[in-house]
């Protein structure tokens, strides 16, 4: 089971963690919500849960809870710019469809 | 929203008879982009009602400034001169004679059986009448600047005559083409 | 997908924090109606499928049909009543002509006299005279006003919207012909109210079409929209500039459309077959209209087309069709000329000619109108759908999903508003083609000493005489302070809102007294009638539900009776004691009696009781059948 990220994503996360200061890393995950089932979680990590999987990314840790890992296996994180917007994008091979606005998805 | 605002200030064109219609229309559209009721269609009913009134006010302002006769009348009103439709009469003999001439030509054209020649004559009459209107516009503008309000009122009355004539030509044209 | 930002622990935003609102655009047409939604509105994932247009989706029913025929059939049997809308109703038109309402849009906002004066032959219904002057049609469900019939159509479309968007609608935009007068617009809004919909805006059909095209083309210029539907004709000229659509002028005929082509062709068929078109039964007439419509539509593909009516074969070719419908097309061209004059636009200034409405599929129409405007018409968006697409775009904006949108529609009043003056003449207060909203005040004075009331008659139309205009309302101004003649100054304010609907208020200026106005619409449904219709529709909804529940339980009861009786006959005697046998037989008789008359609930509890009481019998029967099945076989056989 693995989640990968592009170099651009890594460097942006690194910078943001530096900017915030004292974060263990970032947590990615999924939660149930929205019109179409699941939505992504992307947060700084201040404390770890016992069951968390921790992936070392060099400058920081990538933290995923075991349930989310099932849905996120094989996902690649990227950082992209679209016009004036920029942010992180999840390329998730498990995703079957997403709702019109792209904020939630089905697996 | 100020319902007493001068139309010229509201639409941001300088107060005077000759105005830049391109600027007028562009400013009008910008105002409506902000105040039209469509912009508050999902707001409370009271806000929508105010929007209808203010958009109505903007429309009236635009329409007034767009029409030469109404614009002229409005300028005099701002100067404190009220035009009473009933009492203003035109005493200019030469102008009245011109009026009669136009009417006669129009009546002749209407009775013309040859549509092509009627169209041509109507077009010629239209050019003449439009020319006369343009001259009245220049006259009014000068009288307004010189504050000769009595003469200016007289000019507006003449303009109204000419506008009526233009309408009649228009409906004669309509009858011709239908 | 949406781009994500890193959040503080536990602060990941809920998806759809900026929840999109649910809004649809409805094209309530004479022949067909449609509903569409813009993708800005929340589309149920996978619910509706991808539309042909990238941004707007025309919603379809479960069979995939986007067009909903604007046909409503009222069915009534002894014990139940139901309403059928759309294709199912249309199919039954010939067999149940009196209860199957077609083209109800042509009756919207009409007075009884309008229908009597018009070619009544166009409507094969029995009309009912309401005291308020509103037209009503006698149906199997009693008299129905066009507002109620339209509400049925709107309800079906709204349900499609709810299904696709996954919940109650926040608002709808309903399109109306640009040339609809105040009464017709008001009737449309009343229908929406009856259907429980929140109307964001009544949008003129040609304007909606221009929006659908204009957003594609993204440029500035003059757009001419020629909209010939089933029963209405509109012509509008618009100027597009930086997202603002300014209607320059509009005109048309709110009772001219493809229906009239069908009637003209039907008259021709009658002449060919030596039938008296005035002496047809409603069913014959409906059948002949179907033939006429087939002939017309067949000629879109072929040079000539043949149909059969009662063993007579009828052949029509394109030249003959042109002869039949050219006079009607000519009428529309006259309107086009007037609109060009009103807008002070020359034909060569027009950048795009847009064709809208099913009747513009007619090749003769395209040919003649293309000739008149000296340019080929734009037909890239399906002429049936283009209005709904434009309405959906506007609905999405009005409901608040696109706060940054540049799009703005500046529409106009289609017909002048005026007041009755001395001698039955009409004095115009607001001219046609004035941009709306518009607010105009007019002053009135008393003409008698001590006069405390006066009556004002508001009319709509272009003609000089009161009798030739549509009477909208009579207003009574009361409570004017008694003064000498001419001293009171009553300021009456007329306001036309962005829907094109009129409102009036009045005030006596010298005293500042707000005169009490008794608004008495010349005709049209008052609030009370509408409230009553809403209540009665609920009432019937309940009896309808009760009737359906009863029918279902009756079906279930007869199934239970059937199976228990046959079980008893099969081996009841063998498996049951006499007492048990009598008891179960008694229950059957009881259920039979209940099913004849009782309520669904009573039947249901009896069915449940029989289910319980016969459990033992059923178990014994099961044992027997297992034994029978196993006898003479090995266990392996039985298990495989």
Image (spheres, coloured by chain):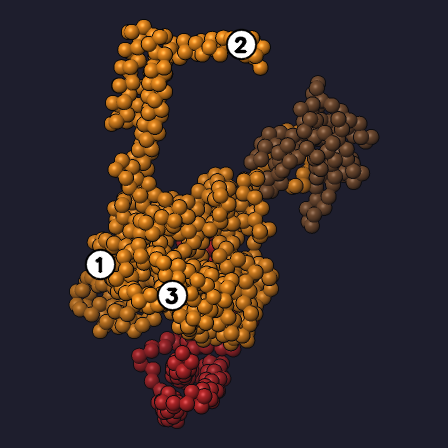
Residue at far left of view: C449
Q: Nearer the viewer, residue C115 or B76?
A: C115
Tell me, by letter, which chain the rendering colours red: B
**Quarter of the N terminus of chain A within the rendering:** top right
Look at discs 3 and 1 and give the one toward the viewer: 3
User: Is residue A33 something that shows in the picture?
Assistant: yes
**Chain of residue at mark 2:** C
Residue C80 quadrant? top left
Q: Mark 3 or mark 2: which comes first in sequence?
A: 3
Q: Residue at position x 27%, y 45% from top?
A: C140
Q: Nearer the viewer, residue C135 or C598?
A: C598
Asked if badge 3 and badge 1 are on a common chain, one would say: yes
Q: Percent x, y for residue C87? A: 41, 48
Residue B103 lies left or right of residue A73; in this view the side is: left
Residue B58 lies left or right of residue C378; in this view the side is: left
Q: CA distance from mark 3 to mark 1?
A: 54 Å
Q: Which mark is residue C265?
A: 3
The residue that label 2 is drawn on is C633
Residue B175 quadrant? bottom left
The residue that label 1 is drawn on is C478
Where disc 2 sits, the SS reads loop
Where disc 3 sits, the SS reads helix
Residue C431 lies left or right of residue C507; in this view the side is: right
Q: Residues within 10 Å of mark 3 (few under 14, many from 20)?
A: many
Q: CA distance from mark 3 to mark 2?
A: 76 Å
Q: Residue at position x 39%, y 76% from top?
A: B81
Tell me, by letter, which chain the rendering colours brown: A
Q: Nearer the viewer, residue C242 or B155?
A: C242
């Amino acid at each position: 089971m693995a989640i990968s990220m592009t170099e651009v994503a890594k460097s942006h996360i690194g910078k943001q963690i530096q900017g915030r200061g004292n974060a263990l890393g970032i947590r990615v995950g999924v939660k149930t919500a929205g019109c179409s089932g699941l939505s992504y979680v992307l947060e700084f990590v201040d404390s770890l849960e016992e069951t968390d999987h921790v992936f070392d990314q060099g400058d920081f840790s990538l933290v995923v809870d075991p349930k989310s890992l099932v849905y996120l296996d094989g996902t690649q994180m990227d950082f992209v710019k679209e016009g004036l917007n920029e942010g992180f994008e999840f390329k998730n091979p498990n995703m079957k469809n997403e709702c019109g606005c792209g904020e939630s998805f089905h697996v | 929203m100020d319902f007493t605002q001068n139309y010229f200030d509201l639409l941001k064109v300088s107060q005077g008879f000759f105005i830049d219609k391109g600027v007028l229309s562009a400013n009008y559209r910008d105002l409506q982009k902000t105040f039209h009721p469509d912009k508050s269609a999902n707001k409370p009913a009271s806000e929508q009602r105010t929007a209808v009134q203010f958009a109505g006010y903007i429309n009236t302002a635009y329409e007034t400034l767009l029409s030469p006769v109404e614009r002229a009348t409005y300028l005099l009103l701002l100067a404190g001169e009220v035009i009473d439709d009933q009492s203003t009469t035109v005493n200019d003999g030469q102008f009245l004679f011109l009026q009669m001439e136009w009417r006669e030509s129009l009546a002749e054209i209407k009775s013309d059986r040859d549509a092509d020649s009627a169209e041509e004559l109507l077009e010629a009459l239209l050019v003449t009448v439009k020319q006369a209107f343009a001259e009245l516009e220049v006259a009014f503008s000068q009288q307004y600047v010189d504050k000769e309000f009595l003469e200016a009122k007289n000019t507006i009355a003449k303009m109204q005559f000419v506008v009526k004539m233009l309408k009649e030509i228009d409906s004669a044209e309509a009858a011709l083409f239908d | 997908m949406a781009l994500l930002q890193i959040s503080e622990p536990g602060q990941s935003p809920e998806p759809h924090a900026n929840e999109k609102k649910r809004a649809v655009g409805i094209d309530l047409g004479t022949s067909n109606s449609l509903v569409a939604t813009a993708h800005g509105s929340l589309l149920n994932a996978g619910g509706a499928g991808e539309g042909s247009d990238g941004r707007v989706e025309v919603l379809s029913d479960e069979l995939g049909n986007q067009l909903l025929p604007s046909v409503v059939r009222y069915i009534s049997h002894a014990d139940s009543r139901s309403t059928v809308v759309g294709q199912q109703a249309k199919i039954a038109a010939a067999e149940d002509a009196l209860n199957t309402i077609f083209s109800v849009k042509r009756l919207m906002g009409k007075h009884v006299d309008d229908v009597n004066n018009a070619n009544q032959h166009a409507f094969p219904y029995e009309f009912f005279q309401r005291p308020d002057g509103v037209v009503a049609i006698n149906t199997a469900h009693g008299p129905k006003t066009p507002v109620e019939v339209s509400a049925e159509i709107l309800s079906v479309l709204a349900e499609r919207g709810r299904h696709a968007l996954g919940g109650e609608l926040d608002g709808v935009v309903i399109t109306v012909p640009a040339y609809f007068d105040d009464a017709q617009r008001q009737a449309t809004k009343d229908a929406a109210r009856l259907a429980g919909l929140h109307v964001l805006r009544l949008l003129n059909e040609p304007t909606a079409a221009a929006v659908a095209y204009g957003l594609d083309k993204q440029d500035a210029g003059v757009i001419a929209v020629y909209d010939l539907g089933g029963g209405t004709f509109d012509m509008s000229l618009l100027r597009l500039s930086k997202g603002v659509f300014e209607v320059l002028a509009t005109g048309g005929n709110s009772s001219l459309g493809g229906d009239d082509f069908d009637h003209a062709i039907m008259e021709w068929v009658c002449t060919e077959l030596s039938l008296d078109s005035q002496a047809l039964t409603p069913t014959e007439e409906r059948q002949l209209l179907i033939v006429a419509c087939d002939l017309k539509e067949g000629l879109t593909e072929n040079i000539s087309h043949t149909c059969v009516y009662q063993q007579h074969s009828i052949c029509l070719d394109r030249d003959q069709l042109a002869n039949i419908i050219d006079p009607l097309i000519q009428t529309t061209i006259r309107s086009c000329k007037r609109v060009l004059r009103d807008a002070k636009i020359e034909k060569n200034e027009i950048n795009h000619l847009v064709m809208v409405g099913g009747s513009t599929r007619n090749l003769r129409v395209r040919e003649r109108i293309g000739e008149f405007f000296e340019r080929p018409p734009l037909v890239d968006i399906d002429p049936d759908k283009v209005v709904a697409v434009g309405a959906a775009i506007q609905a999405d904006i009005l409901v608040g999903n696109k706060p940054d949108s540049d799009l703005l529609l500046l529409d106009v009043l289609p017909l002048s508003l005026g007041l009755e003056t001395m001698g039955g003449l009409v004095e115009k207060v607001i001219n046609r083609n004035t941009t709306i909203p518009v607010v105009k005040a007019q002053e009135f004075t008393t003409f008698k000493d001590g006069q405390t009331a006066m009556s004002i008659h508001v009319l709509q139309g272009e003609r000089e005489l009161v009798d030739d205009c549509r009477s909208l309302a009579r207003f009574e101004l009361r409570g004017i302070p008694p003064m000498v003649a001419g001293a009171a100054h009553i300021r009456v304010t007329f306001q036309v809102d962005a829907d094109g609907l009129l409102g009036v208020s009045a005030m006596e200026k010298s005293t500042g007294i707000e005169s009490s106005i008794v608004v008495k619409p010349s005709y049209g449904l008052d609030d009370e009638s509408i409230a009553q219709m809403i209540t009665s529709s609920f009432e019937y909804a309940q009896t309808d539900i009760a009737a359906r529940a009863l029918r279902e339980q009756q079906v279930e009861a007869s199934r239970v009776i059937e199976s228990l009786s046959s079980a008893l006959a099969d081996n009841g005697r063998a498996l049951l004691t006499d007492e048990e046998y009598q008891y179960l037989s008694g229950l059957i008789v009881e259920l039979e009696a209940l099913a004849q008359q009782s309520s669904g609930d009573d039947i249901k509890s009896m069915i449940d009781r029989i289910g319980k009481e016969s459990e033992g019998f059923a178990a014994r029967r099961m044992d027997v059948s297992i034994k029978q099945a196993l006898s003479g076989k090995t266990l392996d056989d039985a298990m495989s």
